[in-house]
Amino acid sequence: MSKKQQEKSQQTMQELMESAIELFGSKGFVQTSVAEITEHAGYAKGSFYRHWNSKDELFLLIVEHKLKLYRETRDSKIAKANNLKEVMDAIWDFLESTINEKNWSSIFLEFTIYSVRRETLRKLLNKSLYRLSNTIFADLVRDHVETDYPPEKIGALNTALFEGYLIHHSLGTEVISFQDVRQAAIALALKNGTKQG
Amino acid sequence: MSKKQQEKSQQTMQELMESAIELFGSKGFVQTSVAEITEHAGYAKGSFYRHWNSKDELFLLIVEHKLKLYRETRDSKIAKANNLKEVMDAIWDFLESTINEKNWSSIFLEFTIYSVRRETLRKLLNKSLYRLSNTIFADLVRDHVETDYPPEKIGALNTALFEGYLIHHSLGTEVISFQDVRQAAIALALKNGTKQG
DNA sequence: TCAAAAAATGACCATTGGTCACTTTTAAGA
DNA sequence: TCTTAAAAGTGACCAATGGTCATTTTTTGA
């Protein structure tokens, strides 16, 4: 393949991906069709499959990119944290950033539930690359946990509260705000993970 | 319509509904097709639509029935509760019963997420009939809340934690058990809702 | 200018929720 | 017992969708 052709192919791929990001962002995963993605970028449906094997595959790629960016910011903050409270604050800043951008985390939640009945996809999604992984979370907080409550559980409870809030939020209910959940989650983590908690 | 014909129609409806309950229970909502439901009960697809207008409608009916049963048990227990701790215990017994039966609450979670992008359905689902409603929860705990933390928020946080756990559980992760979440949720409610918390 | 390779296309397939004109069954009256 | 109207049941059909692939168009380098 010539250099120029490679570039053209790359460009088409980029255009399709941007079209997909826009459409997923506004309509969610299931409601966005492959034909829409290609049309919106000015191509025919068949072109999609020259770049990815499935709609799932592209979505995972997008998520991977997005999470990578968020995580870089998060990890540099966490490195500076002195105690569990500060770690939790950094984590919740990170979670907030994933919500703020077009409610992206809710779209990812949709995809997560969609994956539950698709075994291969579900196993793939459980990898740290895509999930708010419990093992990664555990590593982040471990150094600051003062009790013998397992760090993994602190992480899983935190994720549960966050994802539960996403459902609440997705349904348009506004009984609790992001701040309420953040506060509750941090209180819970401190209760389980510090001596004074 | 004659009595006998009415009975026949009722019976068919019952057969279809039982078939649907079984299939939804094992394959979830989206992965169960209308044709499967009717075939499994020994009818043709068209028969389905003589009884309900859509797959959604039947699912909602099933949920309504199920929740009704659970709630009766729950409310009779809550009436006897003397403090917030006992109310929370009754509520979590109720939540546990919805999980124990073929993971029914996870299937309902799937349906909830499915409804998010379908406006009419989403609004319908927000009614107390179908949701672990925040207003109902608030009414249940209100008498026992000693602080000025809004009962609605205690309820919404509780639901968030429960539904977040469902996601965790649906993905096959087993970092936290139902007991872990129950314990955390009750601790959180007591922290926000009692003076000694 | 031309041929090979890559890019792009869109008709086609299977699956699905839903529709509806048609067929079969049922039951009540003659 | 026969007739007939109404109800029950059927399955071909429709549109939308994810995915396939033979074919067409474009690009490139000799």
Image (cartoon, coloured by chain):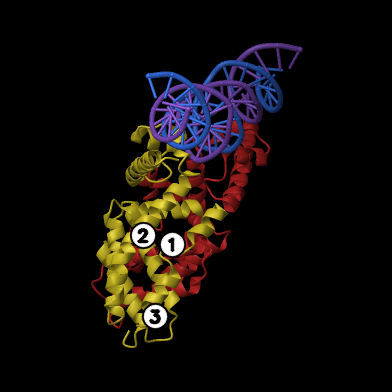
Chain colours: A red, B yellow, C purple, D blue
Q: Earlier in the sequence, mark 3 or mark 1?
A: 1
**Relative to residue A107, is residue B4 drawn left or right?**
left
- For the residues beneath circles 2 and 1, the answer to whether they share a chain is yes
Report the Cα–Cα distance between label 2 and label 3: 22 Å
Q: Earlier in the sequence, mark 2 or mark 3?
A: 2
Question: Which chain does tag 3 point to?
Answer: B
| Label 2 sits on residue | B67
Query: Residue A130, can we see it?
Result: no
- For the residues beneath circles 3 and 1, the answer to whether they share a chain is yes
Disc 2, SS: helix
Report the Cα–Cα distance between label 3 and label 1: 20 Å
| Label 1 sits on residue | B129
Instruction: Determine which of the numbered discs, if any, sits on residue B142 in the image.
Output: 3
- Contact between marks 2 and 1 (CB within 8 A): the answer is yes
- For the residues beneath circles 2 and 3, the answer to whether they share a chain is yes
Name the residue at 42% across, 49% down.
B59
The answer to which of A158 and B67 lies nearer the viewer is: B67
Query: Residue A94, can we see it?
Result: yes
Name the residue type under label 2: Leu
